[in-house]
Image: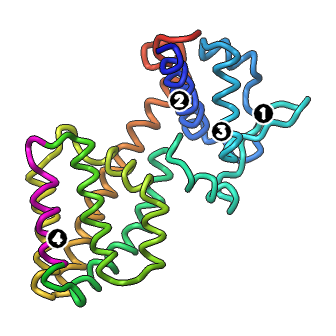
Amino acid sequence: MESIRRTSLVSEVVTLLREVIESQGLAPGDRLPTEAELVESLEVSRPVLREAISQLETLGLVRVKRGRGMFVGDRDSLAGCLKLVRTAMAVTPRDLTQFTELRSALECHGAQRAAELATEADVAELEALYDEMDQRDLTYEKAIGVDFAFHRKLIEITGNELILNVMTVLQEFVVEAMQQTTPRPRDRSVSRRLHRAILEGVRKGDPEAAERAMREHMEVTRVRLETAAQDRQGEGARRAQDPGGPAGPGAGER
């Protein structure tokens, strides 16, 4: 249990540091507070802070220069992007908003091609996933997983292995985006309307209808992500001003 609490606290510190960097508009190369200053302001132990910094350094989001201090890393570099793709840890709404643009392009193309290529068996599988994702006895997390399976199936139907591989690699980002943009409890009426329109476009073999329905779905996702980004940026700013307040790291190892 102690290990779980420590891991949770480290994750909170990682998230808080990223939110502080974004809310203050810090750029790559900008100096971060010293370890002693962060320990005091965040009210955590040095081991917890060092572990959080180590995780951010691994992702290329923080650079530690021995004897000089800690600096914001260049997360937009190719190396930083590749590291970020390997884990959903510390992902922020800004990352997800940018990813949604890529996802929208891939999925709109996928829906269009699926409408052109889907067999009766493909449509039956999409129908089964559609029926399952919003069942009332399904947990939130399970529903998100089925939701992703629906979208992945559309890409599978296209037969484009490159796009499928990209979607599979970025699955953690897709799921993280869904968790940040899908209301709790799940808004089944909106989900069913959006996915039904996509399904019907594919079933009727109407590429334009399927693409249009997917574009509406992606627009809903984009708006929700922008709202989440604004909420979290505001929260990050409040935490930066009052890190010891109720919005700061929770109880655990200090």
Q: Residue at x 44, y 30 (%)?
A: 235
For discs 1 and 3, the disc positioned in front in the rendered view: 3
- Reading the image, the residue beneath label 2 is 11
- Residue in the foreground of this view, choosing between 74 and 2: 2
User: Quick one: label 1 or label 3, which is nearer the N terminus?
Assistant: 3
Q: CA distance from mark 3 to mark 2?
A: 10 Å
Considering the numbered disc 2 on the image, is that residue within a helix, a strand or a loop? helix
- Reading the image, the residue beneath label 1 is 70
From the viewer's perspective, is 224 left or right of 251?
left
User: Quick one: label 4 or label 1, which is nearer the N terminus?
Assistant: 1
User: Quick one: label 4 or label 3, which is nearer the N terminus?
Assistant: 3
- Span of residues in magenta: 122-137
- Residue in the foreground of this view, choosing between 247 and 114: 114
User: Quick one: label 3 or label 2, which is nearer the N terminus?
Assistant: 2
For discs 4 and 1, the disc positioned in front in the rendered view: 4
User: Quick one: label 4 or label 2, which is nearer the N terminus?
Assistant: 2
Considering the numbered disc 4 on the image, is that residue within a helix, a strand or a loop? helix
**Marks 4 and 2 close (CB-CB < 8 Å):** no
- Reading the image, the residue beneath label 4 is 125
